[in-house]
Image (cartoon, grey):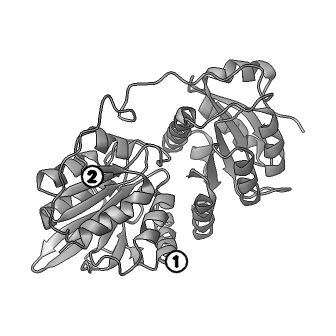
Amino acid sequence: MTIDATSANATAANDKIRVMLVDDSAVVRGLVTRILEEDPTVAVVASVGNGQMALSALERQDIDVIVLDIEMPVMDGMTALPLLLKADPGIRIIMQSTLTLKGADVSLRALQMGAADYIPKPTATRDLAGGMDFKKELLDKVKALGHARRRDPNRKVRPGISNTPIRPAAPRPSALSPTGPIKLRSHNPEPPDVIAIGSSTGGPQALFNLLGTMRAGTVKQPILITQHMPATFTTILAEHITRVSGWDAKEAKDGEVIKGGRVYVAPGDFHMLVETRGADKVLKLTKDPPENFCRPAVDPMLRSISAAYGKRVLVAILTGMGSDGAKGGAVVVEAGGTVVAQDEASSVVWGMPGAAANAGICSAVLPLGEIAPWMIKLATRR
């Protein structure tokens, strides 16, 4: 077994995000390597053809992020995933998946097993040539997860793996790191009429946890979710939420009347908005331009919910890259609504919740396991 990285390259990569590619296609590995290494902060230190080789490579290399294909000979990605996480529990693993119902279902199962995120497997000539959408998504996820791995206070360089100790990447000023104490504001004492949730990287795992705790029947309000996901994946996400939590969860449909006690998931490639029609609140799906590089996006959902429901809105911003949800959350708070954000320690990436927290719009910033009880208390107050 050979690893496509020289010892010299490994030493030079000590200050970079260290990536291992696991795919049975040497062509895909080569092209993905070129895309990643165009960024000077990323180094591909291992490139192997199946899960068994990945386990062997992990014994020899200190790695931050693994891009792991699902279908491979000898040992596939789903078999390798728990073994890799057992060997290094803090490693971040991105699954490569086809944009099919089967691929979406397998990807969501992988997230439940501990994968950090997924990325569509490059198949089209444009993607394999480094199309901008694929290139941006790949680099954004690798860098966000790599930096999160480097900031992990429990991260340890395993002895005897690399010749030179890995030096943590220098901190970068951004919305991911608070510049001072987070200022909390008082919450609306009235129970909300609607609950809205925004999430991205690490979101499916967080949603399963939160809604599994806030089980069906616990609260009577409708729950609207915008999770950054492509079409097909959101269909399967709704099915998994129903399976995990017992909620009646489904993809939103244009013109559908919102009913209490149900979960509505924004479909991939559509913004999900709320309109008032007479006495009803109705879902509206649009192909308006992406916001924060996303469609669906959290900000337009929150703006429309605030316009429709006024101050009786409760929002949770969960783990995810970027800052989507902070501006929409500010609109909610200005109207008298309430926002809670997931804390950094329990987030896969503290981008979205960090932006909301640092904007001073939150009434609480909590570990994931404490968010559902906090929301239930507010939602059931009479």
Q: Locate residue 273: give its quadrant.
A: bottom left
Q: Tag on residue 37?
A: none
In the displayed structure, does residue 343 sit left or right of residue 146? left
Residue 179 location in percent, x, y?
Answer: 32, 28
Q: Locate residue 267: give its quadrant.
A: bottom left
* Element type at mark 2: helix
How dense is the environment of label 2, judged by Cα within 10 Å: few (below 14), some, or many (20 and up)? many
Residue 243 location in percent, x, y?
Answer: 52, 77
Furthest-right residue in this view: 1
* Residue drawn at 78 percent across, 20 percent down: 163
Calculate the distance from the C-alpha at mark 2 to the C-alpha at mark 1.
28 Å
Q: Locate residue 130: give its quadrant.
A: top right
Q: Quadrant of the N terminus?
A: top right
How dense is the environment of label 1, judged by Cα within 10 Å: few (below 14), some, or many (20 and up)? some
The one of 9 and 340 positioned closer to us in this rendering: 340
Task: Give whichever of discs 2 and 1 has the lower sequence position.
Answer: 1
- Amino acid type of disc 1? Arg
Q: Tag on residue 299?
A: 2
* Residue drawn at 36 percent across, 41 percent down: 354
* Element type at mark 1: helix
Residue 37 location in percent, x, y?
Answer: 62, 28
Q: Quadrant of the C terminus?
A: bottom left
In the displayed structure, does residue 115 sit left or right of residue 351? right
In the displayed structure, does residue 15 sit left or right of residue 202? right
Judge whether 342 appears above or below 176 on screen.
below
Residue 359 location in percent, x, y?
Answer: 25, 39
* Residue drawn at 47 percent across, 59 percent down: 206
The one of 345 and 74 positioned closer to us in this rendering: 345
- Amino acid type of disc 2? Asp
Say which residue label 1 marks.
Answer: 243
Judge whether 299 appears above or below 221 on screen.
above
